[in-house]
Amino acid sequence: MAGVKVEFAFTLTARDGGSDFHIAGDFEGAMIKGALGKAVEKDAGRQLEDSVGKLEALATAGV
């Protein structure tokens, strides 16, 4: 989308027997307001959950 800025931060922290993985994201711009902004946020959250789930499956499979 024109004029939309997206920022994501990823943090990995060592923890007993594994790691904690945190993601924070932000969408900014005139196009991301109201109902459209909520729809973009919901869809991005769903896609991020799917992607992280696939990453977790690969990590636990030892690939």
Image (tube, rainbow, N blue to C red):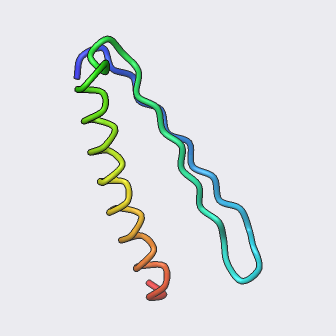
Spot occupied by residue 23 in the image (x, y as percentages of width and height): 54, 50
Furthest residue toward front: 35
In depth, the one of 61 and 45 nearer the eye is: 45
Above or below for 59 versus 49: below
Give the quarter of the image for residue 13: bottom right
The residue positioned 36% from the left and 71% from the top of the image is 54
The residue positioned 74% from the left and 68% from the top of the image is 14
Relative to 55, is 41 on the left or the right?
left
Above or below for 33 versus 23: above
Q: How many marks?
A: 0
The residue positioned 45% from the left and 74% from the top of the image is 56
Relative to 39, is 15 on the left or the right?
right
Spot occupied by residue 62 in the image (x, y as percentages of width and height): 48, 87
Quadrant containing the N terminus in the rendered view? top left
Above or below for 45 versus 31: below
Spot occupied by residue 60 in the image (x, y as percentages of width and height): 49, 85
Furthest residue toward bottom: 61
Give the quarter of the image for residue 63: bottom left
